[in-house]
């Protein structure tokens, strides 16, 4: 599996995912806050299946795994 998420994209995904999960955890937003698991997971593994389907790569080619 090749990485297709760059460093900036990764940081944004992890931040947004954690923010949504924290807001859910403290009760400010409903159960839809669990959607934060998606950007958190894709940020941690640096791979987004939707990016692959659409042919999007936000990382440099040299940081991609074979």
Image: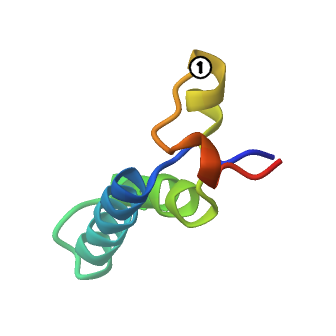
Residue furthest left as drawn: 28
Q: Position of residue 57 (x, y in %)?
A: 53, 33
Secondary element at image label 1? loop
Lateral position of residue 54 relative to residue 9, left or right:
right
Q: Is residue 47 visible?
A: no
Q: Toward the viewer: 55 or 29?
A: 55
Label 1 Cα neighbours within 10 Å, binned few <14 / some 14-19 / many ≥20:
few
Q: Toward the viewer: 16 or 64?
A: 64
Residue furthest top as drawn: 54
Q: Position of residue 34 (x, y in %)?
A: 43, 60
Q: Is residue 30 visible?
A: yes
Lateral position of residue 38 relative to residue 23, left or right:
right
Q: Position of residue 17 (x, y in %)?
A: 37, 63
| Residue 4 location, quadrant | top right
| Residue 26 location, quadrant | bottom left
Q: Looking at the image, is 50 positioned above or below residue 33?
A: above
- For the point 29% across and 77% down, the residue is 22
Residue furthest bottom as drawn: 26
Q: Toward the viewer: 52 or 17?
A: 52
Q: Looking at the image, is 46 positioned above or below residue 23?
A: above
Q: Which residue is mark 1?
A: 55
- For the point 59% across and 20% down, the residue is 55
Lateral position of residue 36 relative to residue 15, left or right:
right
Q: Position of residue 66 (x, y in %)?
A: 83, 47
- For the point 22% across and 75% down, the residue is 27
């Amino acid at each position: 599996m090749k990485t297709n998420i760059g460093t900036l994209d990764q940081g944004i995904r992890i931040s947004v995912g954690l923010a949504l999960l924290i807001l859910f955890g403290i009760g400010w937003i409903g159960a839809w806050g669990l959607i934060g698991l998606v950007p958190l997971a894709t940020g941690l593994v640096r791979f987004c299946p939707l990016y692959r389907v659409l042919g999007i790569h936000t990382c440099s080619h040299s940081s991609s795994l074979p």
